Image (cartoon, grey):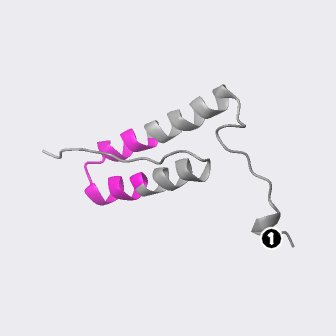
Amino acid sequence: MMHIEDIKAMGFKQMHQAQVEALLMFVQDALRLAAMTEEPDILADVEQSADELVRMFGGNGVSLNYVID
């Protein structure tokens, strides 16, 4: 059984620029789609998931400022 400590992971610094751009584009698309639902709870959940994902790869995270009409 593999333990999480045994996994070798790469971060943004080790990734090819195209990989970083693809991942960040996916995060952007997910946030845009969540915003289109006009459901604040869904947007908050996706924002939290996006933040965790970006931090997991060594980024600074994700933070949204938005206004709901």
Q: Quadrant of the N terminus?
A: bottom right
Q: Specify start and end residues of the magenta stretch as a single range.
A: 30-47
Q: Main secondary structure of the magenta part?
A: helix
SS for tag 1? Answer: loop
- Would residue 10 be found to the left or right of residue 48 on screen? right
* Furthest-right residue in this view: 1
x, y percent for residue 56: 60, 53
- Residue at label 1? 3
Task: Find out whether residue 37 is within the magenta segment.
Answer: yes
Residue at position x 42%, y 47% from top? Answer: 62
Residue at position x 24%, y 44% from top? Answer: 66
- Would residue 1 be found to the left or right of residue 55 on screen? right
**Residue 54 vertical placement versus 45 (above, below):** above
**Residue 11 vertical placement versus 4 (above, below):** above
Task: Count every numbered label the image shows and give the total.
Answer: 1
Q: Residues within 10 Å of mark 1 (few under 14, many from 20)?
A: few
